[in-house]
Image (tube, rainbow, N blue to C red):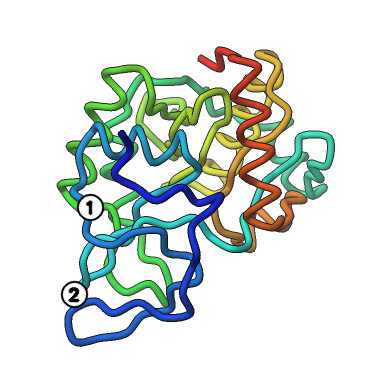
Amino acid sequence: MSEFPNPRTHEFPAWVLAGEYFYDGRDIVSLGNELTVENVRDAYLSGIFPWHIDGMPLPWYCPARRAILEFTEVDIPRSLEKERRKSKFSFTIDKAFREVMENCSKVKRPGQGGTWITPEFIEVYTELHKQGMAHSVEAWDESGELAGGLYGIDSGGVFCGESMFHKASNTSKLALLFLIDRLRERGSTWLDAQVMTPHMETLGAKEIKRSDFLIKLKETQELKSALF
């Protein structure tokens, strides 16, 4: 039995009370559920994801507006395509998951305060990686050093992107393009970007209603595609 309300039928309040403070509840399914491998697995398969915020019980989200990237709508900027053609980086999948996640946790993100990728998140997601649900893409420079990458969750046939980092220009973006090509080869047609970012918008991502996302997720899960 799931610990989480069904986001298809859950009534999202305008505000939720956590301790002494009210928070915008329009995207929050649940507050304070423990961050365990089992809860995280169940959440992603239901279209829910956790996002740590300092000072409040752990929020679990299913946003009213969900960012997705349809592969038929990918629009690669000319400068990035040029960079990809001349790139000397090599790319791998699942070769350095924990290292990728640790690097993502160090990225400074304007307006977000501290990172949501806490040590507890790293432990739980690394275990999910060992179990075959969490995956990483790595970009390596010519010296064999990790230059960028990203990680995310296989939500039952849909890749749900979590975070990216780069140490060299455009390596995280190139890693994403590498991932999209690999997902296409496995029959995937879209990925879940969770919330819109300037980079994802540049690539052609769009926002859809929560109800439409949940239908799309369920329909894709029913195909039982193996992404990795």
Q: Would residue 212 appear left or right of 43 to someone viewing this image? A: right
Q: Amino acid at mark 2?
A: Gly
| SS at circle 2 | loop
Residue 117 in the image: above or below residue 197: above
> Which residue: 28% across, 52% down?
117
Mark 1 packing: few (<14 Cα in 10 Å), some, or many (20+)? some
Across and down, in percent, residue 123 comes to 17, 37
Question: Alpha-carbon distance for marks 2 and 1?
Answer: 15 Å
Examine the rendering and report whether any part of residue 66 can be seen: yes
Q: Nearer the viewer, residue 141 or 81?
A: 81
**In terms of sequence position, does the residue under pointer 2 or pointer 1 come before the other?**
1
Q: Amino acid at mark 1?
A: Asn
Across and down, in percent, residue 81 comes to 76, 39
Examine the rendering and report whether any part of residue 165 can be seen: no
Q: Are marks 2 and 1 in contact (CB under 8 Å)?
A: no
Q: Nearer the viewer, residue 161 or 223?
A: 223
* Residue 55, disc: 2
Mark 2 packing: few (<14 Cα in 10 Å), some, or many (20+)? few
Discs 2/1, front: 1
Q: Would residue 91 appear left or right of 190 to someone viewing this image? A: left
> Which residue: 79% across, 49% down?
77
> Which residue: 49% across, 65% down?
27
Across and down, in percent, residue 96 comes to 32, 25
| SS at circle 1 | loop
- Which quarter of the rendered picture does the N terminus lie within? top left
Mark 1, residue position? 33
Residue 130 in the image: above or below residue 42: above
